[in-house]
Image (cartoon, rainbow, N blue to C red):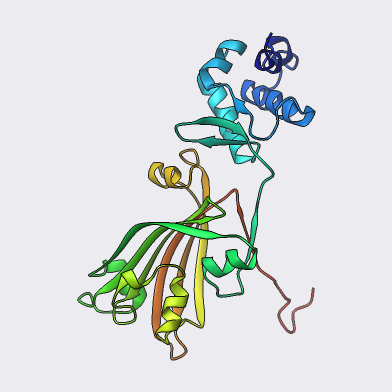
Amino acid sequence: MNAFQTIFQRSRFERDSTAPRYLRVKKLVQDAVASGDLKEGDAIPGERDVAVLLDISRVTVRKAFTDLVADGVLVQRRGSGTYVSGPARRIEQPLSRLTSFTQDMQLRGLKTDADWLERSTGLPTPEEAIKLSISPGEHVSRFHRLRRADGVPMAIELAVIPQHFLPDPASVRGSLYEALEARGVRPVRALQRLHATALTMQEAKLLDLPDGSPALFIERISYLPDGRIIEFTRSHYRGDSYDFVAELTIAPGVKS
């Protein structure tokens, strides 16, 4: 009997017949990780193999694996397979500070890089024109990229800037805010809105996550000291790696 036949033994699976089957599959994996039978980086058998070993459906195994990925126990790599995850790295991002992704990661000692998905100029969409308070005929520069920290895909970011602030998109190679600062137009404040969402198939593929994985969608509008809007950015941050933190104080005159 090999290691995986031991981990996914039918007798172990059937011990608690009252629990839903997918939860029993999850427990087999969690127990194996806790005992050291499965270690960081170990490959997990495919859904079909586990389904055969336990005499259950692949749908049940898939649900268990999806939950384990969401919990940070497993990681799925497209075209490669499913593996035991290492210690989860979570980034705490204060909501009270206006910084760029590059600055955020550098402050944590992480190396950043990016894949450019689009770097171009053109007319704004109706939404972009409204958010930037510009006319529909005024051109914008777009910066769409996949952001990484220490090689791990962390966020998909689409920033739109009125073109007169950044005429040549190719001039931005690293930090967008550094490029703006070089032209004397760095934003000083921003309004951010965020909500939970599920990644589309394309977004999940870019972030190396299963389809439908949870993410944080953030919309940012940034302002110059004179009140002009300089940036409209929409980002998807992977939900298993980010904690957004806000400090709250009691308003004057309000009793606790």
Q: Is residue 247 left or right of residue 181?
A: right
Q: Quadrant of residue 117?
A: bottom left
* 118 lies left or right of 122: right
- Left or right, 229 with respect to 58, comes to left
Could you tell me residue 95's position as x and y percent?
Answer: 60, 69
Q: Nearer the viewer, residue 142 or 108?
A: 108
Which is nearer the eye, 67 or 77? 77
| In the image, farthest residue toward the bottom | 226
The quarter of the picture where the N terminus appears is top right
Q: Is residue 108 above or below residue 47?
A: below
Q: Quadrant of residue 171?
A: bottom left
State the count of labels. Answer: 0
Q: Residue at x 74, y 17 (%)?
A: 16
Determine whether, in the image, residue 37 is placed left or right of residue 192: right
Residue nearest the observer in this picture, 67 or 5:
5
Position of residue 32 measured from the top left corner of the image (x, y, whole percent): 73, 25
Give the residue displayed 39% in from the left and 79% down from the top: 230
- Residue 11, image x and y in percent? 72, 10
Residue at 29% from the left image edge and 82% from the top image edge: 164
186 up-or-down from 81: above or below: below
Q: Can residue 107 be spotted in the picture?
A: yes
The image position of residue 96, as x and y in percent, is 61, 74
Q: Quadrant of the C terminus?
A: bottom right
Q: Nearer the viewer, residue 112 or 14?
A: 112
* Residue 205 lies in quadrant: top left
Residue displayed at 60% across by 48% down: 240
Is there any visible trace of residue 17 in the rendered image?
Answer: no
In the image, residue 44 sits, relative to residue 243, either above or below, namely: above
